[in-house]
Amino acid sequence: MHQRIVKSPHAVVPGYSSVSAWSAPVQRCLAPVGIGNEAAGLVGPWIRRKLLSPSLKLSVAAVAAGLLATCSTPPDLLTQIRKLGVLRVVTRNSPNAFFSGANDEPEGPEYELVRRFADDLGVRLILTPRRKFPDIYAMVIDGHADIAAAALTVPQHPVEDLSYGPVYQRIREHLIYRRSGVKPRSLAEVGNGHLEVAAGSSHARNLRDQRSLLPTLAWVENGNTETLELLERVANGDIDFTIADSNEFAQARDANPELEVAFDFAGEQQLAWALSSRDDSLMNEARQYFARVAIRGDLGEILKRYYGRGEKLQFVGARGVMRHIQGRLPMLRDWFEAAATSVGEDWRLLAAIGYQESKWDPSAASNNGAVGIMQLTEQAALRVKVSNRVDPHSSIVGGARYFKQVREQIPDHVPEPDRTWFALAAYNVGYGHLEDARILTQKMGRDPDSWQDVRDFLPLLAQERWYSQAQNGYARGWEPVRYVDNVRAYRDLLEWLMPSAVAPPPHFAGS
């Protein structure tokens, strides 16, 4: 089903109307759970206009009557969307979200994701573009849109009336400068340069968070532009610096090769949809949808098509993953949760490590003598005081302790999430080889505290030219890179399927 895209909030998709006046009874019934003007306006005075066919008028009236009949206990948002046959999405006209491509056909990563979601729900998709972030959020909060899908960054602090998720891409923030200009190594070195960001963006929030440390830092927040335009202005020499997400920079770099990354901000940003926090039915459905598209490979394919590279979701045997989540994980989950609590980790990260190591098979054994759920060697088991490596409970407890020990070896100044990715790599290949790769990374002028940089040099430890210079010698350096990618992918899958401590594993037909 190929949906017609609404490019104006008051345009009409055949068979539907987008209006600003509600029918009063329907408004009172639907308002508590977030159905806004467009959907409620399908009934009332607008039905009498010639926007709807006679048969569809009867269908809409029947839906309205059914909703009014249940007004004392209004149905959840997902049920209402299915009954009304419409999914309303607010987005941005941007290469990262939605735009008109060849032959005026809609394109963009967010468009493709929400279109497939609407297809899964069996409803029509209505897109409403908005330029400014505050306007995007307001449409969801006020009930005028069901989802905001606009390459939104999950904020560090909760936003009232909004829930973010599922996280479908992780990116980094870059400070961008022109190659012929002066390269600052930190915000403190920006000095008197002209730094400009889009107003209301996560980049503006990031700068405000830095103000307590850098009280003299000055910048411009422009409410009439967006990051891609600012990148062009840097390339043209109109401004000195801007901040861009790594996916935005990847798109702009091809057209503006003179752009360069000065440095990365600490940590990483998460991209997700924004939904109303008043009703979690649609969010739960979205989580299961993202799990499905990740397992099928659709998510990675979409990201690769638009950004030149995909998130490395290397699910080997998709049906097996879901079968194991439903069949094996429930028997182990309590142990993963308890072990994670004891070492201060997310249980889903430990479970993802266990799945990558053994597919949660207590009898799994490797050629190097590692056995059990967490594939502990005899030496590792001694370090964490585990006597029975094939006992599932003991293995999980031991694996959690061992991971904590490995993490504590990572230098304190390494920021998250890089610290976690380094710990995963060291868990797989050994801390000594990780340090060799970090030293090599630094020698080559790259950042030894950045996983994105170090992962490029780990595979070189399998080449004599490089491992002959390393203190710990040869290593199958490509394996920890693949290992970290897979554990991250499995962890993301578990986060989508099990967002809270009480969520049961869902069942997918045919899995």
Image: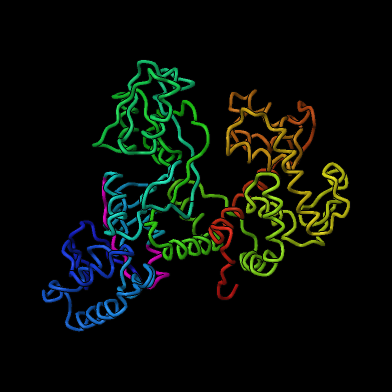
Is 128 a magenta residue?
yes
Report the residue at 46% width, 38% height from top. 246
- Picture layout, residue 402 above or below residue 78: above
Query: Is residue 142 magenta-colored?
Result: no
Is 418 located above or below residue 263 in the figure? below
Q: Is residue 301 visible?
A: yes
Q: Is residue 258 above or below residue 50?
A: above
* Residue 289 in picture, x, y percent from top left: 48, 64
Quadrant in which residue 177 is drawn: top left
Query: Which residues make up the magenta segment?
Result: 115-131
Q: Which of 72/110 is in front? A: 72
Displayed quadrant of residue 509? bottom right
Instruction: Estimate the x, y position of residue 146 in percent, counting from the top left.
Output: 33, 61
Q: Would you say 22 lies left or right of 449 here?
A: left
Residue 444 appears at what percent x and percent y? 62, 25
Say whether residue 109 is visible.
no
Residue drawn at x 67%, y 66% as measured from the top left: 330
Residue at image location 38% in from the left, 17% down from the top: 216
